[in-house]
Image (cartoon, rainbow, N blue to C red):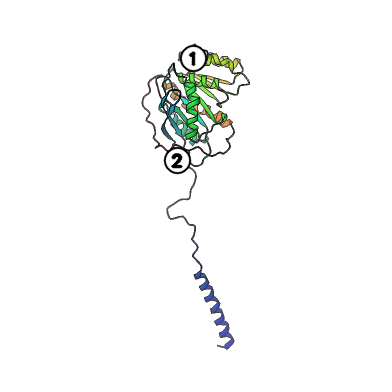
Amino acid sequence: MPINARRLALRAMLVVCSALAAASARPAQAMNVAPAGTAAPGPCQETQGQVIGDSLTSTVYGAAVPFDVYLPPCYDVDDMPLPVMYLLHAATLDQTEWQALGAATAADALIAGGAPPFVMVMPGGDYRYDIDYAAFVLNDLLPTTQGRYPVRTDEAGQTLGGISLGGYWALRAAFQNPQVFAAVGGHSPVVDEGRPDDPWALADTLTSTTRLPVMLDVGTYDTLRFRTQALADRLQANGAAVTFWAGAGGHDPAYWGAHMGDYLRGYLQFLAAGTAQPASPAPPRSRRAPTRARAGPLKCC
């Protein structure tokens, strides 16, 4: 081989060797490859929410009062506050009534169908003549819930409703404080116990300028039907925003359970109408062990 050719070949070999040496001196670059059999993070795969049993020390009762909280699937994915429904039980019952009527199942189905996630808070506590349950809701239940769970605190982000005597207290609390809730519901509600602060008496304080939609319903065979319809007529005559309907049934769990989806959809339409609350530091969350409450047979009412 001619001398010039050998020199050129030798020079090429030196270049290649230098390149290989430099490459081996550099640290290896880790490849961003997921391990075999794992999937990249994706949308929420949960289909059921969870019900947490909790309690608070009530300034109104002067004792501990239990309450249950429904949290939607994947509620802890982010820290944005969620809309919340406060739901009051009927007389002689407790915080488990709404669950026994299918509230958690209905909420799961609504969210699976595309409804925005929401929280439900279901307090216990006996109804007593010496206890102002409206004060308990406003002064004990709301602040405790807002401090422990990722819920909205603005008017557009929370509703209040109740069944039977729970409907009485929901209507009374909301009529006295219409600026607190996006809407209030009374399902087969007691409306008049002869007190000056009954929903029947307070109905005249709601007018066309009051921003508080009222939802009322009752069974066609319920002895409270005519008084509930009379309350709806009175609210409408005063210009308040009210919806009323009567469905087949009586004053019993069968009627309320059959309409559980209707109740939650009714509240959602008013929660959806509100604007999202601006992002803020999330309150510390309860880390109690979640338990799906057992839904036993209901007594009445």
Residue drawn 55% across the image and 82% down it: 10
Q: Position of residue 78 (x, y in %)?
A: 51, 41
Residue drawn 50% across the image and 28% down it: 142
Q: Position of residue 94 (x, y in %)?
A: 40, 24
Marks 1 and 2, how far apart in space? 40 Å
Q: Amino acid at mark 2?
A: Glu
Q: Amino acid at mark 1?
A: Arg
Near mark 1 (Cα within 10 A), the count class, few <14, some 14-19 or many ≥20, is many
Near mark 2 (Cα within 10 A), the count class, few <14, some 14-19 or many ≥20, is few
Kindly indicate the quadrant of the structure image that contains residue 212.
top right
Quarter of the image with the N terminus in it: bottom right
Quarter of the image with the C terminus in it: top left
Relative to 271, residue 207 above or below = above
Image disc number at residue 131: none
Image disc number at residue 225: 1
Q: Position of residue 211 (x, y in %)?
A: 60, 24
| Residue position marked by numbered label 2 in the rendering | 46
Which residue is more in the foreground, 256 or 96? Answer: 96
Kind of element beneath mark 2 = loop
Which residue is more in the foreground, 282 or 53? Answer: 282
- Residue at the far bottom in the pictured view: 2
Kindly indicate the quadrant of the structure image that contains residue 223.
top left
Kind of element beneath mark 1 = helix
Q: Position of residue 166 (x, y in %)?
A: 46, 21
Mark 1 or mark 2, earlier in chain: 2
